[in-house]
């Protein structure tokens, strides 16, 4: 099956064509934002990390920034750094260049401050935009697609309509050779045996159990019980009674396909098919990790309603709650409530959502894109120093 995308020199395919302004550290966020605002057609990635991070925590941020910069939706990158931070802007630039895409770097300390760096960055990004934003869509194979599966603001309808609907589409994509990426490790607690039982081999099954156990260990180290914070108050108000019930609903987004691989936060998978990324349940951080892992589009279910988007990829918002579908209709791209109400079959709605996905990856804008939602967050696994 084919769609219309942007072919990159490294063989990947974008569903959007952005010139990215990427801040390497929180200190460079303001300058990065001003550069992006001055040049239409650019995307902006800012965050709160990049310095004062220890060991694996700093490496995770670096890996995430590397992956965001190499996402197939990115045509070219300007990295903006302060100049003395812990993250490496040079590494980001070199990694992008290995893909055959243009990359450049400006340092605030070397340019002479805020205004001089903004002006220098604008000149660089204008040249990139003139060269890259004229690229045309070409016919591409669906097997080059990596679809992130996400839920946020779940309620009782999520696990009986919207999530199984996404699972149906996920299985369809995988049958065509594409990749679907499941995340939110805390929302596998109590259902990890089901996912590990679907693993392609014992080693992958073991890894599924390990990442879930690690979440429990992290909570225990803080002397807290995850079951006191998950489900959230909003989940409970929406009708979810326990973490196990929430987890059972969450994993239906993964359909029935075998789990081919488990990857770290922000890591690019090596396998096609169903992949699990070890992320928090917090949707903004989870989505950011999957974008760094190469996802070009997100299928995002919500029962309570959320406007969350992403800066470098379309987010298709799906709800099975008829009240949310009406009350927050400007934020919802697909109404799955006819399944909840018994008015439509999963298969019928699945065909419609699959058609919607094909339209979006070929250029149709989603609600979050139209409204300008570009939320980001890189998860932390260590203290600041």
Image (spheres, rainbow, N blue to C red):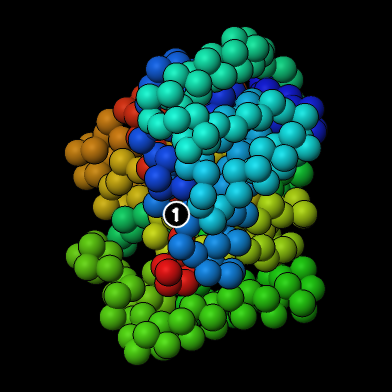
Residue at x 31% of width, y 71% of height: 231
Q: Is residue 341 left or right of residue 180?
A: left
Q: Nearer the viewer, residue 313 or 347?
A: 313
Q: Position of residue 194 (x, y in %)?
A: 59, 75
Q: Which residue is mark 1?
A: 49
Q: Nearer the viewer, residue 376 or 79?
A: 79
Q: Position of residue 64 (x, y in %)?
A: 58, 52
Is residue 271 visible from the viewing direction of this image? yes
Q: Which quadrant of the structure image shows residue 69? A: top right
Residue at x 41% of width, y 32% of height: 113
Residue at x 47% of width, y 35% of height: 108
Is residue 16 visible from the viewing direction of this image? no
Specify few, some or many for label 1: CA neighbours under 10 Å numbering under 14, 14-19, or 20 or more. many
Q: In the displayed structure, would residue 256 be above or below residue 202?
A: above
Quadrant assignment for the N terminus:
top right
Q: In the displayed structure, would residue 363 be above or below residue 21?
A: above
Q: Is residue 161 left or right of residue 129?
A: left
Q: Position of residue 274 (x, y in %)?
A: 67, 56
Q: In the displayed structure, would residue 34 be above or below residue 133?
A: below
Tag 1's secondary structure? loop
Quadrant assignment for the C terminus:
bottom left
Residue at x 45% of width, y 30% of height: 112
Q: Position of residue 312 (x, y in %)?
A: 51, 34
Q: Is residue 220 left or right of residue 229?
A: right
């Amino acid at each position: 099956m084919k769609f219309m995308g942007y072919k990159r020199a490294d063989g990947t395919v974008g569903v959007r064509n952005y010139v990215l302004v990427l801040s390497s550290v929180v200190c460079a966020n303001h300058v990065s934002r001003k550069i992006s605002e001055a040049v239409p057609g650019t995307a902006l990635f800012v965050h709160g990390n990049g310095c004062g991070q220890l060991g694996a925590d700093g490496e995770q941020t670096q890996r995430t920034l590397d992956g965001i910069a190499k996402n197939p939706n990115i045509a070219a990158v300007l990295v903006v750094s302060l100049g003395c931070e812990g993250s490496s802007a040079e590494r980001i630039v070199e990694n992008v260049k290995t893909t055959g895409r243009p990359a450049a770097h400006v340092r605030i300390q070397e340019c002479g401050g805020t205004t001089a760096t903004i002006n220098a960055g604008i000149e660089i990004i204008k040249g990139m935009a003139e060269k890259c934003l004229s690229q045309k869509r070409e016919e591409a194979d669906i097997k080059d697609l990596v679809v992130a599966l996400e839920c946020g603001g779940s309620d009782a309808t999520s696990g009986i309509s919207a999530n199984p609907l996404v699972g149906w589409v996920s299985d369809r994509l995988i049958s065509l050779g594409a990749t679907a990426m499941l995340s939110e490790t805390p929302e596998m607690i109590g259902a990890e045996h089901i996912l590990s039982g679907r693993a392609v081999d014992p080693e992958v099954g073991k890894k599924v159990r390990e990442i879930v156990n690690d979440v429990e260990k992290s909570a225990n180290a803080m002397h807290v019980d995850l079951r006191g914070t998950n489900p959230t108050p909003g989940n409970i108000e929406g009708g979810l009674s326990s973490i196990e019930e929430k987890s059972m609903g969450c994993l239906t987004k993964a359909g029935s396909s075998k789990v081919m691989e488990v990857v770290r936060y922000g890591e690019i998978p090596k396998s096609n098919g169903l992949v699990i990324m070890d992320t928090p349940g917090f949707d903004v951080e989870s989505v950011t990790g999957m974008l760094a892992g190469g996802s070009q589009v997100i299928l995002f279910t919500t029962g309570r309603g959320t406007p969350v988007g992403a800066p470098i990829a379309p987010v298709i918002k799906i709800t099975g709650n008829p009240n949310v579908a009406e009350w927050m209709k400007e934020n919802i791209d697909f109404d799955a409530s006819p399944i909840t109400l018994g008015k439509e079959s999963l298969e019928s709605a699945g065909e419609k959502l699959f058609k919607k996905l094909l339209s979006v990856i070929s250029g149709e804008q989603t609600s979050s894109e139209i409204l300008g939602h570009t939320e980001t967050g890189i998860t932390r696994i260590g203290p600041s120093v």
